[in-house]
Image (cartoon, coloured by chain):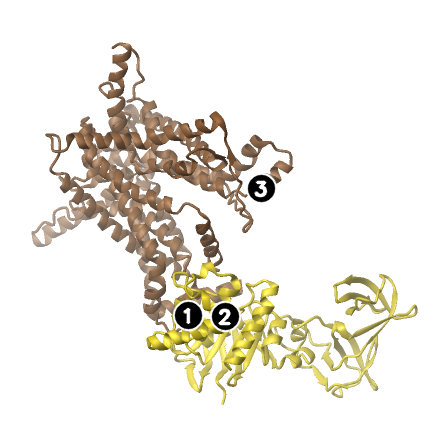
Amino acid sequence: MHMSQATTAPYHRLRLGLWLQGDLWPVAAGAIALLVATPIIVVVSSLATPSRDIWAHLWRTYLLELVWHTLLLIAGVGLGVLLLGTGLAWLVTKYRFPGRRLFEWLLILPMAMPAYVMGFVFLGIFDYTGPVQQTWRWLFGPKTWFPDIASPGGVVLVMTLVLYPYVYLLTRTAFSEQSAGTVEAARALGLGELGVFWRVMLPLARPSIATGLALALMEALADFGTVGIYGYSTFTVAIYRVWFGLFNREAAAELASVLLFFTFGLLLLERRMRGRAHFSQTEGGLRPVPPRLLAGWRAWAATGLCGCIVTAAFLLPVAQLLYWTLSTLGGPESDARYVIFLTNTVMLAAVTALIAVIAAVVLAYGLRLSRSRILPSIARFASMGYALPGSVIAVGVLIPLSFIDHTLDDFLRKAFGISSGLLLTGSIAGLVFAYLVRFLAVSSQTLEASLVKITPSMDMAARSLGTSPWGVLQRVHLPLLRGGLGCAAILVFVDVMKEMPATLLLRPFGYDTLAVRIWQLTSESFWEAAALPALTIVAGGMLPVLLLIRRLPTAVMRSHAMQERRDEPPLA
Amino acid sequence: MSLLSLEQLTKSYPAQPLPAVDHLSLELGKGEIVALLGPSGCGKTTTLRLIAGFERPDAGVVEIGGKAMANGRMSVPPERRGVGVVFQEYTLFPHLTVGENILFGLRHLTTHERTQRLREMLEMVGLGAFARRYPHELSGGQQQRVALARALAPRPAVLLLDEPFSNLDADLRTQMLHEVYAILRHLETTAVFVTHDHEEAFMVADRVGILNAGRLEQLGCPEEIYHRPATRFVARFVGQANFLPGRVVRTGIETDIGTFPNPLDLPEGAAVEVMIRPHQLELRPDATGNGLVVSRRFRGADALVVVQLPSGVTLYSHQPSTLRFQAWERVSVGAKPCHHVVFSASESWREGVNTDHANRETTPA
């Protein structure tokens, strides 16, 4: 204990002292973390101070329906992504069949598709007037029954198809990291192949499955665009209606706090399911289980299953979007304002990405240089924004910001007779702040992952070789962080691009983005016109997926990972 | 003139009652290699960091080449000290190739000089073909060599090595030890080498300093440290040692296994302890002997034989493995130490605090 403290902490202080006086980084980091945590605190505190009238009203009207719908959604999507995600992960890691290598990454692609895009595409395809039902009626007569896509089952299906990759991705990694030694030990102890799956592999993968499930369900809870157009009222829809329909912000805040409650429940559940377990396979002995060759019809069944999923969840919707886009191009339904929406979206996303990356740098260095015990907890609390639905954050941002706006405006009117107008809520400032609350965790986690690779002794090595502190930053830190910074920026950029409810609630009047436009068009069933914005968003969504695919473990990557593990600082 | 000089160097950390380095003084001549040896937390790494400039001393002076690098008031930053450091975990820059790593500290040279130096360094560590490789493509030993080349490339006045071999496995460690030693000697490098392994320290260093709780307990050549330890701490840290209780009588020091010379005219009647290394004990099978073999463990070249004396004192001895002692066999116990190291028995010996300067020794008989 003596040594570790002696070797790390004071050194940081010295380095800091040399290129920036004082404890500036930790203070700035604390300020950022607190700022980002404010909206969360605002919403939580509105749960703590319930307004009796509003609750009575909510209870009489649609609270029960909302809770029931939300629970149904969680149960349905949870079951769906568990089965699909775990099953597909199992299939591609444990068996060899035609196309396995290809499907390993093709199965991630649906991640690029926001649920609301998938939602309206499926409505367009499977609705009464869609091509499928038309063919059906032509074949079997006009009165033949066909399942209604705009139903709870339809919502669950759509969300399962776009959200299963979370479970798939994490579970696949967990399965592929399980060493053959573990399996052999279980076999030697008398377990059959199925027994090994149920009693060894699945329990070992449980923490990863739990995390994937929690991520998928958080997305499901946060979804607004899909449930909105399917007429399936959940909290996000209710918040939107109460906000814009009734202009009742208190009620919106109360509803947001209930949604927050669900999210917390999910986080707790994840922690419980993950348990204390942090399974790590013996290092060095990472000998993966060789996949078994499937033969005959089984092999083709596996290929067929994977093919069906990829087709349904990615190829079909993309093809449909392309078809719609091409068929409307230049026609009366094409929208010249597309360029404006695109510019707005890119601008918002770029500004947010830039700020989020800068904030992440400050936060990461602040955490690294500080010895405070409070700062990490504040930072962890602030990073919860990622778990929160955009609607909740929008409510949490708007309440304090409009308070500031009005206070400032009142003060200026009284003191100088001028009006500042709605400085924050009337501009994109409030919106960018809301994005920051939601996505700071994305950038800071990405950055921290690359920062741990820079050990304190690396700085010392550079210094002893005659490099000044700024030189160390330029010649060692920046090159090593460049990848992380780029990744963080891309991830935030794409997340902002896709975010719908927060944008809808907080955008300045008339400031439309691609996501907003998709909502406007799809809530009026203009599927064809929504195709081009949707396709743009899907194309953007491909970026992080491609990053993920590039990181898929290969032999080289593994040796790299080993190296990184060895280089981990004593701090970590 | 000394090339590196530490004078009364002191460094404390907040929230730690004892200083990490406590009034440490040390001087190194040109080309001298000194090993700082001690257990975890003894302050050896902190000393290295004070020399390199990663820490500021609370008090005391660091001088390199006659120039003050740090005292209580100022501290020259590490990049202007002309000190090379080899780290325990090698710490190569992962984004740079082997060549770029070695060139990292050579920005002030001309392109020609740089290529020249790079070739020289690669040749020296035998990695001529590896200049374009990345660190993660190298083995542990190769990374270690690159780290050494990188630290030596700018021709530092002093080279500091922080446990450089502790990440290598046993075979490679010995090999690297010899290689590094040869290189340092060849370049006549002045070096401070920190380790917790006394064999490493003995093999590499001209002089060895034993650190305990931030203080230099003893500084001397390896033989002196081993055979004439200044304190019981030193005696134990550099190898196994038996402390045999005895009493000063007129003829010398009387113990359970015989009488030893009284090295420094200790007063008659004084209670003392004589240090005897396990290999200095002699055991002979003897049915009437004063020792009882408690256990014997074969170790290869020799065997560890534990003997109990009538007084209850247990002695550890190393015996040739060809001698087959049986457990519960009676033996006669004798000793022929080449130096007689005697500690006062009355002082309380506490781990980590050096209160013990009562030891004296005689020259070899």
Instruction: Specify the colour of chain A.
Output: brown
Give yes or no for contact between labels 1 and 3 (Cβ–Cβ under 8 Å): no
The lab-note entry on whether marks 1 and 3 share a chain reads no
Q: Which mark is residue B126?
A: 2
Q: Which residue lies furthest to the right in this view?
A: B288
The residue at 43%/79% (across/down) is: B155
Give yes or no for contact between labels 2 and 1 (Cβ–Cβ under 8 Å): no
The percent position of residue B225, horizontal first and vertical second, equals: 65, 79
**Foreground tag (3 vs 2):** 2
Q: Name the residue under label 1.
A: B102
Sequence-wise, the earlier of marks 2 and 1 is 1
Specify whether B86 is left or right of A542: right
Instruction: Specify the colour of chain B.
Output: yellow
Q: Mark 3 points at which residue?
A: A182
Q: Quadrant of the C terminus of chain B?
A: bottom right
- Describe the element under mark 2 as helix, strand or loop: loop
The lab-note entry on whether marks 3 and 2 share a chain reads no
